[in-house]
Amino acid sequence: MKVLHIITDLLLGGAESVLVEVASRGQRDGHTNVVVSLTDDQPLGERLRAAGIQVMSLNMRPNRPDPRAVLRLAKIIRAEKPDLIQTW
């Protein structure tokens, strides 16, 4: 199964830490996980990559809507063709 995770950021926090654990376990169990961060991918992006998980960032500025980012996200979803989209 391919799971696309969408999260606001990958800063150290509760949801972010759970995402790293869920995606890493899924990867070990043979599932494909892809993570899209709406802002940047630090500091947890490197931990995800080390687990073999693809990480992408839309580089949105916090509290500044960017319609182009929505289009980039739609393009990623179409390209990745996930079986499941998990939002955080």
Image (tube, rainbow, N blue to C red):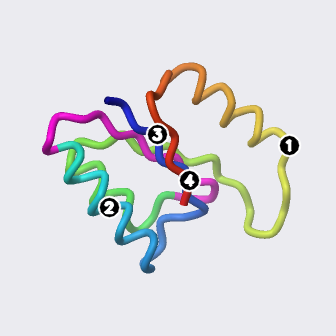
Q: CA distance from mark 4 to mark 2?
A: 13 Å
Residue that carries the numbered disc 4 in the rendered image: 87
Q: Quadrant of residue 53?
A: top left
Mark 4 vs mark 2, foreground winner is 4
Q: Earlier in the sequence, mark 1 or mark 3?
A: 3
Few, some or many C-alpha atoms within 10 Å of disc 4 (few <14, some 14-19, many ≥20)? few
Element marked by disc 4: strand
Task: Work out which quarter of the rendered image holds the C terminus and state it.
Answer: bottom right
Q: Nearer the viewer, residue 49 or 8?
A: 8
Q: Which label sits on residue 4?
A: 3
Q: CA distance from mark 1 to mark 3?
A: 20 Å
Residue that carries the numbered disc 1 in the rendered image: 67
Q: Residue at x 52, y 40 (%)?
A: 85
Q: CA distance from mark 4 to mark 3?
A: 8 Å
Q: Residue at x 40, y 38 (%)?
A: 3
Tell me which amino acid carries mark 1.
Pro
Q: CA distance from mark 4 to mark 1?
A: 18 Å
Q: Earlier in the sequence, mark 4 or mark 3?
A: 3
Task: Work out which quarter of the rendered image holds the N terminus and state it.
Answer: top left
Q: Find the residue positioned furthest to the bottom.
A: 13
Mark 4 vs mark 1, foreground winner is 4
Tell me which amino acid carries mark 2.
Val
Mark 2 vs mark 1, foreground winner is 2
Q: Earlier in the sequence, mark 4 or mark 1?
A: 1
Tell me which amino acid carries mark 3.
Leu
In the image, residue 26 above or below residue 1: below
Q: CA distance from mark 2 to mark 3?
A: 13 Å
Mark 1 vs mark 3, foreground winner is 3
Look at the image and give the residue range highlighted in magenta. Answer: 28-40
User: Where is residue 18 shown, x and y percent of the image?
Assistant: 35, 68
